[in-house]
Amino acid sequence: MKTKLLVTTLSVLFLVWGCSSFTNRQNKNISKNAYDVGEIVKHKGYVLSYNEQFEQPNWVEYSLKCSDLDNNVRRTNDYRADPLVKTGSLTPADYKYSGYDQGHMAPARDMSTNVEIMSESFYMSNMAPQIPYFNRSGLWKKSESAVRQWACQNEVLYIIAGPVLDDSVKQKGKLYIPSKFFKVIRASDKKMIGFIFPHSESKDGILKYAKTIDEVEQVTSLDFFSDLPDNLEKKLESTLDVKMWELSSVKGFYNRKERKSGKVSDLKLLYGGKCEVGEIMSASLRGCCSYHGGAYGPKRGRACCTKEKKVICSDGTISPGCNCY
């Protein structure tokens, strides 16, 4: 029987949620049937099903609103075993010298509601072994940035992500290396998109790997969003319109010479402007351009010019003030 994962109908609670309580960040997106697979572990910012055999999550579920990113909470980087996993999780030492990253399923940046939730995102139960490029710059990283952009374009997103734990998994020491990862995203009851990413150093854009939810379910043997009325679930899960999930692709705010010299004082990025951010193009949702490794400009990380005093970059990075270079 397929495991059933569902997103409950939005309620007034979700529309007015705060930033610190357990129920506000957890969402209760998982049906009772899902609790039959693995060990279910509930943290304040996310819920997961832990796979003892492969020592990584079967899936990790969380929700994201644009306002969740509007907090200047720094990464804690306190990787550690998860005390709530009864069978015991891996430790950072198990990854040492393996050549693989401890890849977040629920990204740390999306857990920036407060320091406690940020810290919990570094439990090893939230990790799967990932190729460094895949995790830091490649498809997985690009998908995380895209989710943050989409969260600021929609009222709320529900995300379920994890490794594909099938016969293609290979063992290295205590690590089990997946050959694929999945991610499914639901924006209210209006649209859905899924992904099956090859665990590789591909430099492709993420939309190349977009799937219907039905297609992801076939690969993962997980049944998503089963709380919806059957006719609506069938419609949304069987169709995909990538135009509803496009990433911005506008270039040309300043030239290469200006980037090199750092003289970009004439840069004008108004609210809702667009930015060139390396391999992926991303909207400047609140007037700030940023990408992993730093925005183009004399300083790494930010390049913005707006009247706002606090802006959120397209990948979720907080700029405490507006600095025009």
Image (cartoon, rainbow, N blue to C red):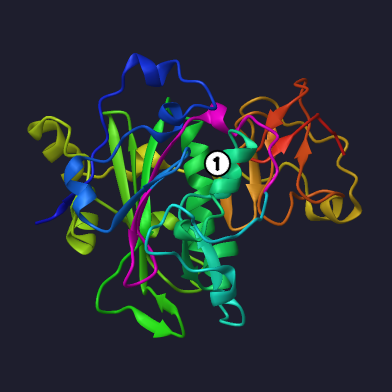
Nearer-the-camera pick, 51 or 84: 84
First to last magenta residue range? 48-75
Quarter of the view holding residue 182: bottom left
Residue holding disc 1: 111
Image x and y of residue 62, in percent: 41, 41
The three-letter amino acid code for the residue at tag 1 is Met
Along the viewing direction, whichever of 11 and 190 lies nearer the viewer: 11
| Front residue (pair 197, 175) | 175
Q: Quadrant of residue 250?
A: top right
Q: Is residue 237 above or below residue 105?
A: above
The residue located at (59%, 74%) in the rendering is: 93
Q: How many marks?
A: 1
Does the stretch in magenta take in 36?
A: no
Horizontal side of 223 relative to 100 (left or right) equals: left
Rendered location of residue 202, percent (x, y): 48, 71
Q: Is residue 21 left or right of residue 40?
A: right
Residue at the image position 54 percent from the left and 26 percent from the top: 19
Give residue 16's position: percent from left, percent from top. Answer: 45, 15
Is residue 182 shown to the viewer in this render? no
Q: In this image, 115 relative to 209: left or right?
A: right
The local crowd at label 1, few if under 14, some if 14 to 19, many if 20 or more residues have their Cα within 10 Å, is many
Q: Secondary structure at mark 1?
A: helix
- Whether residue 147 can be seen here: yes
* Rendered position, 20 above or below 257: above
- Which quarter shows the N terminus? bottom left
Q: Point out residue 195 in the picture as x, y percentages from the top left corner.
A: 34, 55
Q: Is residue 308 left or right of residue 156?
A: right
Q: Is residue 115 above or below residue 77?
A: above
* In magenta stretch: residue 71: yes
